Image (cartoon, rainbow, N blue to C red):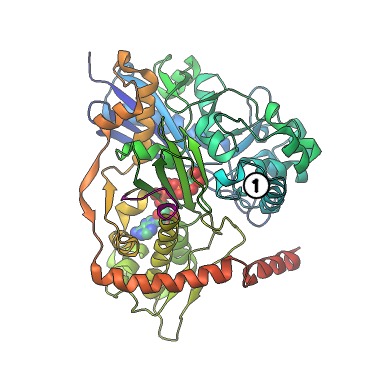
Amino acid sequence: MSKKYAIGVDYGTQSGRAVLVDLSNGHEVADHVTPYPHGVIDEKLPVSGIPLGHDWALQHPDDYLEVLRRSVPAVLQQSGVAAEDVIGLGIDFTACTMLPVDADGTPLCFKPEWKDNPHGWVKLWKHHAAQDEADRLNAIAAERGEKFLPRYGGKISSEWMIAKVWQILNEAPEVYDATDRFTEATDWVISQLTGEFVRNSCTAGYKSIWHKQEGYPSKEFFKALDPRLENLTETKLRGDIKPLGTKAGEITPEMAALTGLKAGTAVAVGNVDAHAAVPAVGVVDEGKLVMAMGTSICHMLLGTEEVEVEGMCGVVEDGIIPGYKGYEAGQSAVGDIFEWFVEEAVPAYVKEAAEKEGVGVHQWLTERASQYKPGQSGLVALDWWNGNRSVLVDTNLTGVVVGYTLLTKPEEMYRALLEATAYGTRTIIDAFHNNGVPVHEVYACGGLPQRNRLLMQIYADVTNREIKIADSKQTPAVGAAMFGAVAAGSAKGGYDSVVDAAKAMARVREETFKPIPENVAIYERLYQEYRQLHDYFGRGANDVMKRLKALKDEVSH
Ligand SMILES: Nc1ncnc2c1ncn2[C@@H]1O[C@H](COP(=O)(O)OP(=O)(O)O)[C@@H](O)[C@H]1O
Ligand SMILES: O=C(CO)[C@H](O)[C@H](O)COP(=O)(O)O
């Protein structure tokens, strides 16, 4: 049999990338990135210019097809690999990134009658405007003693499916009525590739409150939310839910013409970016936490028991690797906070100096921040620029920096922000480790470990754990390709399970980041300061952030 390959397509927040992977060793033969032409739509709708409210974040579904049109042919061409040797394709996506579609699977925003209604568009994972709905959902679920709540760390996030659907119903009932199904973008793209609509167990479990044994929450629960939602799960959330590691279908002739792949190529069910990354770093059993570090961080961990952990995003059976309970937690902004600082808060002299030295602003700041010792800046920050996903599950929390003086330098502020995100991760690791889901090893993948060594050293020091780094720039895409190979199966030159695929294909670098004892000691003290601020501002002692946000909304309308 000739050498066989699979393609993984990773749909990130700002771009999508295809990677063509050698199935014998996981080697990335070719990759290609397509920036989304419309990016993140958070101020106004394309063409009509209709303004969006605070905390909105939309995307254009055609941008996802553009990735298939451009990046898949590009990796075939670059690699010179024949389409018949590409036996499978898998995708991974941000989530919950959801959209309303009609009975043909057409996104409502593609239709002239809905294109000017913001609710007809894709709601990106970081669309946070459904917080009111999430708050009400959580209060009603708690009051009714719903069994599902502990599986989601005690709170359902406004980033997820039910809160977003309910926001559509409340603010645009006409869009709700016109919707045949609400779908995760990952499932929609798979339906475009295969002509068949299937949901995947990963997003259904983590983002739509679905349970392998118990299914969705009861009709009574949905009726208690809003009588109009009573039949939601059997109407607009209907559809077969297939486990990860199964085949969704095959590339249609139309998609073959568009991508250059062979019609009939196996396509895996949809997956989530962070979840797909786990087997790609070789993690297929317990005790090993994987951090997918980019715009945000997702923290992924496997266990054998269903344990309650405060503020985790969820525990889902087979949600990451078949046979294990998959745990997820996360931070809603990490790289995004550093980007905010670079774009919005650095003085002109920094940009000029970086330009003069021919380096990026991140690199300029990082080089200078590296010259400080832990604690030397006198700063400590809370990492809540985009709310707090874990462990507080509250998108209404905002950022804080304590310790500024007239002498504070931009590189010190930048370092304080890097450190704040590490404290956020430490809080999550402690929550798992101290509540029955041990964390013995830490792995990192995604864009940040490739770009910022200081950041990774700070994470090793703050968590007091050695960190292993993925030997791939595109780890989720490699994971998605593994699932594509499993969808094809061993008879076609792929694999029969993702564990087999991981054995042959997963790679981490030899070099690791090890904690430096003197840094660990200082960071332990700084972390205690962080925790005091965290509990003071985040657990109700002082709701100033919420009052300011409410005032901002009041005076802006
Ligand atoms: N040198 C750097 N140090 C820290 N953060 C960086 C650096 N360069 C880029 N970033 C951040 O990386 C993030 C993008 O990460 P990446 O993994 O590529 O994307 P995504 O999460 O969308 O897949 C951006 O938020 C950006 O601010
Ligand atoms: O919540 C998620 C997965 O469960 C999102 O997909 C994730 O946080 C966004 O990922 P990225 O930072 O890589 O764009």
> Counting other residues with Cα less than 10 Å from the Cα at mark 1, is it few (<14), some (14-19), or many (20 or more)?
many
Q: Is residue 416 left or right of residue 504?
A: right
Position in image of residue 404 (x %, y %): 46, 81
Where residue 162 appears, as percent x and y from the top left, is 66, 41
Position above or below: 484 against 19: above
Identify the residue shown where x is 50% and y is 18%.
254
Residue at mark 1? 45
Res 550 quadrant in image? bottom right
Q: Amino acid at mark 1?
A: Leu
Q: Is residue 228 visible?
A: yes
Note whether ligand 2 is within 8 Å of mark 1.
no
| Residue visible at 75% across and 41% down in the picture | 169
Instruction: Say which residue appears at 60% left-offset and 50% top-offset.
Output: 155
Tell me the chief SS of the magenta region: loop
- Front-most of residues 439 and 376: 439
Q: Quadrant of residue 92?
A: top left
User: Dot 1 lies on which element?
Assistant: loop
**Residue 439 covered by magenta stretch:** yes
Vertical arrangement, residue 317 with respect to residue 400, above or below:
above
* Residue 346 falls left or right of residue 313: left
Specify the farthest residue to the right: 227
Instruction: Tell me where the magenta segment starts and ends, as one range.
Output: 432-441
Q: Is residue 111 magenta?
A: no
Q: Is residue 174 visible?
A: no
Image quadrant in which the N terminus is located: top left
